[in-house]
Amino acid sequence: MIAIATPLHFERLKTCSTFDYPKAHGSCCISSMIRNVIQQYPERQAACRNRFRSVCSRLRHKWRAIAAISCCGVNGTKGKLRTGGLIMAVRMGTSEHGGTFYTQGQAIAELFNRGRSGADQCVVQTSDASIHNAEQLDGGELEFGFMASNWIGRAKNATAPFTKPIAVRMVAPANAGPMCFVKLASSPIRSVADFNGKRVAIGTKGSGMEQHIRTIFDLLGISFDSFTPLHMGFAEGADALVAGAIDVQFHPPIPNKVLTDLSQCADIRVVPFAAGQLDKVLAQVPFYRPVLVEKNVFRGVVEDVMQVGVINVLVTHERVLDNVVHDMAKAIADNLDRLPQMNLLFKGLKDLFTPLRIKGAAAFEFGGVPLHPGAVKAYRETGWLS
């Protein structure tokens, strides 16, 4: 389950512990490499073959399988070319096991894999989510990755926490998940405007959740000096809320297991925005959407509450070949009704596609990140783009 490309001279082979496709000199297959090396260095035939066997043995042990390597030429008769090397699997970076991105990735991978052999199926991989996925895409360790859309422009422009530009490309939106502040039902807090002097758990330091709060509060004129921001993980923050150690906790998009569990052990409420606050935020941040937290979606939601939703997206890298991205985008576009049945996080996905018909590809180009040509082709075929 790794892409392989092949240097054509012995010294590079001798020092190579794995075959690094971004550094390879073209798209030849393994058998071609063997022939070329033997022709150039006949006296090193045995050493070359032994080195090749050693590398493949380690790769098999690490990745579980390396198959169909001797019959696949440039056009990929038994496998598909991913970025100029031999594709053994399409790798998708998600989040922690059981997280939002992970469960969404499982559903998309199931659709992508229909009718495919094991050699070119999509493999869902756990990760540390958005930033980690972007870094792995840049390193050639993934073909696709989930990111919150507020991060992709930063990755493209090398804005902190990214230290160099990453050539990410858009594939598709995944969902617009509502984020929300929660409090105990007994708290006197009535709206987001009442956080002055309160203790607010804002997520771990430098996390996407902290960035969201800073973006929202900056637009609303709420200074971080006016309340006590506390860096806590979700489970830690939930425990602190129950214990009375904090007043408010900011939660990631629902469905959210920590929030569901919290609602079962404490009487909580979603904190609404004050009049005009939500409109002000939505008017100025293109990757936010208004999303309804519906009554009874979890215990403690006693009425419908409109909240800020961030658009989560599936991205790729510019080097990933058009046909691979096309197939992934088409698997999504062909199943806009099916995906919400597989995972409720996809509810409203078709609504996120609607702007394509009005604004064209720019509707998906959050943060100035272009839509990958393979995705453009898929959306033209499915009627979403003219």
Image (cartoon, helix red, strand yellow):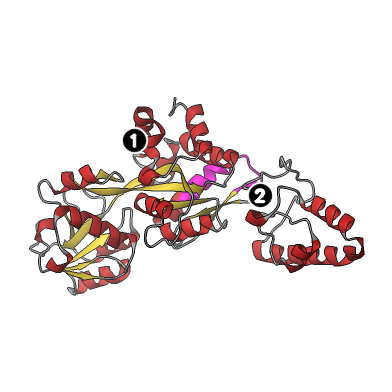
In the picture, measured across the screen, residue 261 lies left or right of residue 74, that is: left
Residue found 45% across the figure and 55% down from its top: 165
- The image shows residue 366 at horizontal and vertical percentages of 37, 44
83 or 276: nearer the eye? Answer: 83
Name the residue type under label 2.
Ile
Left or right of residue 71, residue 191 in this image: left
Please identify the quarter of the rendering in which residue 337 is found. top left
What span is in magenta? 105-121
User: Which of the pair 8/66 is nearer the observer?
Assistant: 8
Circle 2 — which element? loop
**Secondary element type, mark 1:** helix
Q: Amino acid at mark 1?
A: Asp
Q: Nearer the viewer, residue 134 or 354?
A: 134
Q: Which residue is mark 2?
A: 87
Residue farthest along the right direction in this orientation: 43
**Whether residue 113 is situated above or below residue 190 in the rendered picture:** above
Magenta region, main secondary structure: helix
Tell me the residue that label 1 is attached to: 351
Residue 296 within the segment the image draws in magenta: no
Q: Is any part of residue 2 visible from this angle?
A: no
Q: Residues within 10 Å of mark 2 (few under 14, many from 20)?
A: many
> Which mark sits nearer the N-terminus, 1 or 2?
2
Q: Quick check: marks 1 and 2 in contact, CB under 8 Å?
A: no
